[in-house]
Amino acid sequence: MAYTPPTGNITTGVEVFSWVNSDLVNNLFFPLVLVAIFIIMITKQMYHATTISRAVASSSFTCMILSILLRITNLLDTTTMVIFIILTAISAVWMQLENIG
């Protein structure tokens, strides 16, 4: 698979990840990493949490924080960050509804 070598002088880790994300995998690296982290965390949390809603809420909250940090460093697009924010809100409502009933 052919790829373009980095142009300019890459001196920081953020520049390396930015090059990998933009040139090598067409801006899919960090969204896929976040989805993988979400899946790993939800399976681990389902083992320890008392309900599935708590597992989804804690996993989505952690991925939301990671997506915000990646968006601040401009390594993630806004759409992915908003998806994890909405997922966290939905899971928080789901967890609250389970606690009421």
Image (cartoon, rainbow, N blue to C red):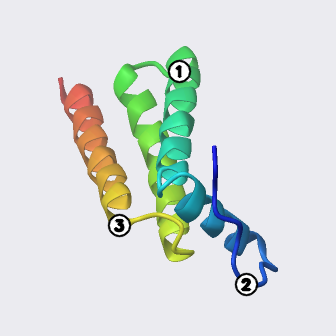
Which residue position holds label 1?
Answer: 43
Examine the rendered structure and indicate whether residue 60 appears above or below residue 69: above
Q: Residue type at mark 1?
A: Thr
Q: Residue at x 47, y 39 (%)?
A: 35
Q: CA distance from mark 1 to mark 2?
A: 41 Å
Depth check: give the residue in front, 84 or 78.
Answer: 78
Left or right for 71, reference 40:
left
- Circle number at residue 8: 2
Of labels 3 and 2, the one closer to you: 2
Q: Earlier in the sequence, mark 1 or mark 2?
A: 2
Query: Residue 100 occupies which quadrant of the picture?
Result: top left
- Circle number at residue 78: 3
Examine the rendered structure and indicate whether residue 37 appears above or below residue 51: below
Depth check: give the residue in front, 31 or 43.
Answer: 31
Q: CA distance from mark 3 to mark 2?
A: 26 Å
Q: Residues within 10 Å of mark 2 (few under 14, many from 20)?
A: few
Q: Residue type at mark 3?
A: Thr
Of labels 3 and 1, the one closer to you: 3
Q: Residue type at mark 2?
A: Gly
Which quadrant: the N terminus? top right
Q: CA distance from mark 3 to mark 1?
A: 26 Å
- Residue lying at the far front in this picture: please name it: 2
Of labels 1 and 2, the one closer to you: 2
